[in-house]
Image: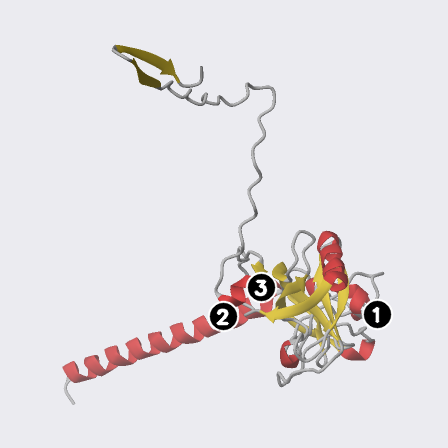
């Protein structure tokens, strides 16, 4: 083997050795950096937690995760979540966040799911009103009422509330995991205090119907009142117009009747050889 070949082989070996050494050094650096990242213990659900449920120590557990990725609102001790009510369902191994549970003294069940300033109002329903049982917790509905307007003689239908969240169906605070309909006699809606009054009045004045909305459709539509005439394609009868009364003005001007024109009659009187002509006006 000549000298040039030996030098070439030696140069290649040095290059390979340098690359291997650089790769090993890079791995060591990454391992050291990973070891230096601080970890934090956070509370996660040990099993599926349903809305309204009160958390016990066996429902949750602690896991370690890099502190740089811990989201805001996470709990770091189990004792901080025990006895809190679940506001929205939490799946197993999911972080328990403050936005998903009620406050310390807010209890559990339905009351813990009502935000401050809002009210829960229940309405009696049947299969038709509850849209065949598909009005379940987590859905949104419009409230439509048919009643007798105070100013009309025929029933009318109008939408009184739009995009109202459904809190509960009967005593169930969450929907069926398979999406099956729930046949219940009562639906509980989440409304403002003013809307709670409207909903109560609608239930006492007429018949309520719930219209199910797509969860992504949150825009409120401008709707009017539908009267009975609309079923038959006829416009509503116009209100009778009242005669205008002018007060403090001059009485309407009335043209005078034309006076009859007097007619003149001529009478010729013959007496022997005398002839006289007399004229007479009518009315004299």
Q: Nearer the viewer, residue 188 or 100?
A: 188
Q: Residue 26: x, y in percent?
A: 44, 71
State the SS at label 2: helix
Image quarter for residue 182?
bottom right
Crowd tier of the residue under label 3, counting other residues whose Cα lies within 10 Å: few below 14, some 14–19, many 20 or above: some
Picture mark count: 3
Q: Residue at x 69, y 67 (%)?
A: 208
Estimate the spatial distance between the alpha carbons at disc 1 and disc 2, rounded to whole Å.
42 Å
Q: Is residue 182 above or below residue 193?
A: below
Closer to the chain start, of discs 2 and 3, is 2
Residue sitting at x 64%, y 85%: 180
Marks 1, 2: nearer the viewer: 1
* Of 271 and 19, the residue lying toward us: 271
Counting residues from the N terminus, which is met first, the one under dot 1 or under dot 2?
2
Q: Earlier in the sequence, mark 1 or mark 3?
A: 1
The CA span between labels 2 and 3 is: 77 Å
* Relative image position of residue 189 (x, y in whole percent): 71, 65
From the top left corner, tell me how far across and down residue 69 is, in percent.
Answer: 59, 65
**Mark sitting on residue 228:** 3
Residue wearing tag 2? 30
Q: Which disc is residue 83 wearing? A: 1
Lateral position of residue 128 relative to residue 201, left or right: left
Q: Quadrant of residue 198?
A: bottom right
Q: Quadrant of the N terminus?
A: bottom left
């Amino acid at each position: 083997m000549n000298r040039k070949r030996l030098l070439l082989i030696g140069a290649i070996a040095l290059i390979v050795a340098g690359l291997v050494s650089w790769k090993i050094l890079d791995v060591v650096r990454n391992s050291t950096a990973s070891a230096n990242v601080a970890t934090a213990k956070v509370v996660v659900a040990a099993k599926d937690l349903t809305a309204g449920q009160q958390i016990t120590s066996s429902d949750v557990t602690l896991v370690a995760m890099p502190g740089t990725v811990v989201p805001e609102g996470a709990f770091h001790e189990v004792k901080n979540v025990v006895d809190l009510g679940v506001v929205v369902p939490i799946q197993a191994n999911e972080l328990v966040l403050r936005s998903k549970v009620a406050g310390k003294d807010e209890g559990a069940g339905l009351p813990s799911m009502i935000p401050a300033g809002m009210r829960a109002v229940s309405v009696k329903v049947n299969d038709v009103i509850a849209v065949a049982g598909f009005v379940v917790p987590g859905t949104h509905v419009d409230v439509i009422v048919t009643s007798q307007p105070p100013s009309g003689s025929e029933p009318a239908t109008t939408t009184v509330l739009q995009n109202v969240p459904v809190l509960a169906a009967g005593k169930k605070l969450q929907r069926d995991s398979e999406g099956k309909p729930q046949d219940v006699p009562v639906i509980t809606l989440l409304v403002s205090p003013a809307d709670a009054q409207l909903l109560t009045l609608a239930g006492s004045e007429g018949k309520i119907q719930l219209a199910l909305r797509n969860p992504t459709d949150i825009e409120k539509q401008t709707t009017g009142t539908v009267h009975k005439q609309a079923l038959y394609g006829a416009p509503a009868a116009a209100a009778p117009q009242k005669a205008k009364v002018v007060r403090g003005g001059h009485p309407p001007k009335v043209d005078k009747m034309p006076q009859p024109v007097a007619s003149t009659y001529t009478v010729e009187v013959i007496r022997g050889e005398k002839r006289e002509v007399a004229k007479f006006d009518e009315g004299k």
